[in-house]
Image: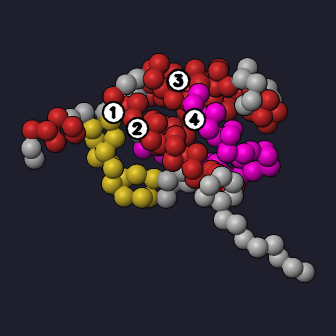
Amino acid sequence: MTADLQRRYRGLRKTQSEDIDGNIMGATLLPTSISEDLISAIVHDFYGRIRPDPLLGPIFNARIGEHWDLHLSTLVDFWSSIALKTGRYSGRPHVVHQGLDLVPEHFEHWLSMFEATVFQHCTGEAASFFLDRSRRIADSLQIGLNIGPNAIKLPAKQL
């Protein structure tokens, strides 16, 4: 391995990658600088920003109601499963996001807010990891909800 590659992969750990529903996608390198504390800080800060947001806040507040502590715990488990391979999350994110009348602009705004939050908590490989996975999650949810640029446009069934 060249010195350049050694520098690039220093601080990373190799593990299997999973998609949003836990399906194994192959080996990937994960930053070792990601910790439970970092995940918790990002999740709590991010959703602290979401709650008062005029676009996303009403959607989240209507669905979550008074159960924010449970939601935050679930999302910490979700990100821990993605970033640290803890396996603590076993939910079904596509199902949870159905019936919310989401549009691509919601995901764009969510990503913008998430990226700003991530950059306040970390840099380098850790930030790149969170941003990459958040974009993949947004893409996967939009495909699952059949919205956005990758939605499948099927002809209407005739009865």
Q: Residue at the location (82% across, 33% down)? A: 62
Q: Secondary structure at mark 2?
A: helix
Which residue was labeled with disc 3? 117
Which residue was labeled with disc 4? 111
Find out whether residue 120 is within the magenta segment. no
- Percent coordinates x, y for residue 43 in the rendering: 56, 27
Q: Nearer the viewer, mark 2 or mark 4?
A: 4
Give, as a three-letter code, the residue at label 1: Glu
Q: Residue at the location (81% across, 72% down)? A: 156
- Say whether residue 49 is left or right of residue 127: right
Placement of 63 over or under 138, stated as above or below: above
The Cα atoms of the two marked residues, 2 and 4, are separated by 14 Å
The Cα atoms of the two marked residues, 4 and 1, are separated by 18 Å
Mark closest to the chain's N terminus, 3 or 2: 3
Label 4: how many residues lie within 10 Å, few (<14), some (14-19) or many (20+)? some
Q: Secondary structure at mark 3?
A: helix
Q: Residue at the location (62% across, 34% down)? A: 110
